[in-house]
């Protein structure tokens, strides 16, 4: 049965979290030998904490965009059905009553499965369905889940509906009411493990989410929720948990470990601060890390104040890995204390799906497969993103053309209707393809994999020039006489593909022989040199409009229009209305790579 959320939250307001008690048998007592005689038996206890993160709606080992079993070059498998098998094995080995199962966020966005139950057959509708992720995670038996930034992508109403359907708390100590600054979600979860002949072991799980939510989902959370820094809130809550008797403190943090941010200086907080939390806040034993989509079997961080070691682990995203923390405790001087912590990751490709989970969600899966395979038009030629990182590809022009058309139509009759409209888009995927012939929703969804929405901003020619210079930093500086290796040409400084932007409606060269900041050459509009003072309406996705990627000027630019319909949906509508997807209706060569003025390709 779903948890009574009202009762749970009321209890949280008074005590900070609901308290669940489980009976657990302690590990065998260790024996010490002193002066040739066995010493009194010392009570010990072994706790195992399992964790996933960044599931992004992956229940099955299935690629909805390819309409086939998921495969990659590394041989990974995906999906909660696989994780369930791993969890069952660990519970069988350790004893279920000696384990906790956690997640570090980004649960309800990321696949057509999650989109379908947010938008097509929404869980918010009266008498609507139970979210597949809630069903799967309830069945597997999660104890607590931290909020991820993508939990807010569909708005607070959808998130609250998902929360009501879960039999576990959604934790977010630093997700607070914007007015009162009181927790808007349970900050923590506590559970007591009984040990024969000794006091119970009390374990506290503190949930922390990403402060970047204030930027990335500004449209949904501004004025309603605020997201203080992780270090600040951990420093507030960890001592409270210890004073409440917590013998073990585990943090589930939707925040990477690198100490970096993707939103520049727009917030005074660090996006990826899990290691900083470990270093700065005393009293933490282990941190389940999320958000960064990297695999960290074990990372040891020394706390600067106590000198104690904090163990961090991040399992690979999409349910490809399960982190396992083994925590050894000893009872001495009337209290339990942590003696050691070790972590590792288990690979979900080593096991088969749990049939209980695949059977549970077979109907939901079938509905989504049918939905994404709907034919919405025909293509006259194959379109692909294979070269889109370094060549102006028609398939990306499709995105910018749709965005231009939507914004122009939206501004008719306004004072901004006379301004020229330009548009940005990123090469999100390196493998997307719209084949010649029938075009389906899944073809278009694979082109635009994020649930971004469209925003219109007013920017000047000078600001657009600076925007393009920043975008061009994506390319590795390459001398005019050097051999060009396209595999090493992009992602300079680790910049991901989604933080490189095309801008349509202009013409320009990117001279990669030049230093960053001096690469944009021959920038023109309608055949004439770009006027720095001229104003444009810039069609841009909400992630970029709110500051994602730290592109200059766009976040502070005047916003003249926005909507909640996903860009992916707008592309499908555009193709459906046209009936025929012909590159002559949208393709144009707006930019090219050069070296000292000579085209690279």
Image (cartoon, rainbow, N blue to C red):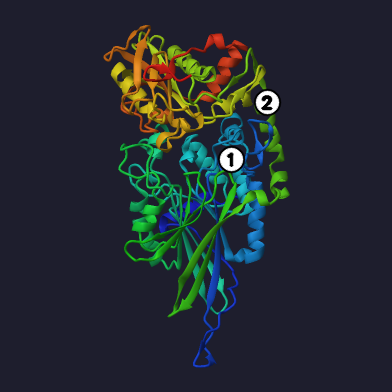
Which comes before the other along the chain, label 1 or label 2? Answer: 1
| Secondary structure of the residue carrying numbered label 2 | loop
Where residue 238 sits, quadrant-wise, is: bottom left
Q: Residue at x 55, y 47 (%)?
A: 316
On screen, residue 596 above or below 222 = above
Q: Relative to 356, does residue 393 appear above or below in the rendering?
A: above
Q: Could you tell me residue 517's position as x and y percent?
A: 31, 27
Using a 10 Å C-alpha cutoff, classify the residue at mark 2 as few (fewer than 14 neighbours), some (14 to 19) or many (20 or more): some
Residue occupied by mark 1: 57
Asked whether the viewer can see residue 381, the reply is yes
Residue at point 48%, 77% (across, down): 331
Judge by depth and name the residue closer to the eye, 350 or 134: 350
User: What residue lies at 66% left-to-right and 32% top-to-bottom?
Assistant: 368
Residue at image position (40%, 46%) is 272
Give the residue at mark 2: 373
**Foreground residue among 541 and 593:** 593
The image shows residue 423, relative to residue 84, as above or below, that is: above
Left or right of 421 in this view: 43: right
Q: CA distance from mark 1 to mark 2?
A: 18 Å
Of all residues, the one furthest to the front in this rendering is: 481
Residue 437 in the image: state x and y as whole percent.
68, 16
> Which residue is more in the foreground, 214 or 523?
523
């Amino acid at each position: 049965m779903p948890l009574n959320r009202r009762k749970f939250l009321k209890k949280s307001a008074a005590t900070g979290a609901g308290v669940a008690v489980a009976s657990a048998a302690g590990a065998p007592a260790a024996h010490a030998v002193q002066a040739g005689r066995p010493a009194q038996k010392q009570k010990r206890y072994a706790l195992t904490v399992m964790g996933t993160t960044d599931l992004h709606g992956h229940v099955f080992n299935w690629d909805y965009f390819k309409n086939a079993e998921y495969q990659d070059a590394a041989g990974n498998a995906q999906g909660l059905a696989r994780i369930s098998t791993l969890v069952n094995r660990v519970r069988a080995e350790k004893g279920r009553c000696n384990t906790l199962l956690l997640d570090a966020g980004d649960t309800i966005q990321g696949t057509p499965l999650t989109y379908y139950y947010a938008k097509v057959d929404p869980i918010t509708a009266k008498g609507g369905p139970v979210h597949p992720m809630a069903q799967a995670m309830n069945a597997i038996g999660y104890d607590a889940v931290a909020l991820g930034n993508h939990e807010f992508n569909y708005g607070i109403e959808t998130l609250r509906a998902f929360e009501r359907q879960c039999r576990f708390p959604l934790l977010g100590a630093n997700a607070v009411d914007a007015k009162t600054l009181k927790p808007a979600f349970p900050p923590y979860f506590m559970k007591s493990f009984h040990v024969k002949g000794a006091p119970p072991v009390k374990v506290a799980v503190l949930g922390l989410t990403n402060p970047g939510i204030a930027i990335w989902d500004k449209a949904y959370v501004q004025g309603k929720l605020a997201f203080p820094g992780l270090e600040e809130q951990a420093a507030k809550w960890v001592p409270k948990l210890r004073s409440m008797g917590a013998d073990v403190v585990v943090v589930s943090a939707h925040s990477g470990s690198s100490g970096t941010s993707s939103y520049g200086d727009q917030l005074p907080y660090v996006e990826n601060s899990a290691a900083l939390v470990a270093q700065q806040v005393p009293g933490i034993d282990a941190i389940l890390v999320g958000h960064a989509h990297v695999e960290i079997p074990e990372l040891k961080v020394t706390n600067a104040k106590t000198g104690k070691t904090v163990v961090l682990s991040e399992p690979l995203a999409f349910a490809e890995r399960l982190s396992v923390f083994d925590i050894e405790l000893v009872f001495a001087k009337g209290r339990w204390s942590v003696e050691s912590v070790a972590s590792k990751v288990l690979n979900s490709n080593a096991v088969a799906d749990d049939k209980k989970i695949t059977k549970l969600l077979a109907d939901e899966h079938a509905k989504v497969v049918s939905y994404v395979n709907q034919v919405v038009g025909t293509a006259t030629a194959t379109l692909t993103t294979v070269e889109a990182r370094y060549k102006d590809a028609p398939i990306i022009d499709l995105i910018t053309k749709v965005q231009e058309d939507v914004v122009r139509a939206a501004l008719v009759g306004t004072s901004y209707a006379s301004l020229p409209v330009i548009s940005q888009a990123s090469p999100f995927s390196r493998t997307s393809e719209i084949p010649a012939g029938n075009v389906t929703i899944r073809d278009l969804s694979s082109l635009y994999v994020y649930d971004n929405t469209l925003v219109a901003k007013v920017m000047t020619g000078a600001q657009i020039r600076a925007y393009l210079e920043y975008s061009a930093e994506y390319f590795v500086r390459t001398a005019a006489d050097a051999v060009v290796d396209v595999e090493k040409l992009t992602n300079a400084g680790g910049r991901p593909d989604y933080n490189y932007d095309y801008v349509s409606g202009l013409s320009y060269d990117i001279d990669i022989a030049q230093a960053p900041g001096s690469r944009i050459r021959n920038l023109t509009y309608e055949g004439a040199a770009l006027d720095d003072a001229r104003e444009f309406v810039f069609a841009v996705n909400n992630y970029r409009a709110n500051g994602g990627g730290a592109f200059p000027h766009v976040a502070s630019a005047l916003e003249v229009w926005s909507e909640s319909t996903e860009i992916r949906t707008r592309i499908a509508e555009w193709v459906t209305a046209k009936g025929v997807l012909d590159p002559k209706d949208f393709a144009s060569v707006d930019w090219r790579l050069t070296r000292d003025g000579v085209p690279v390709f």
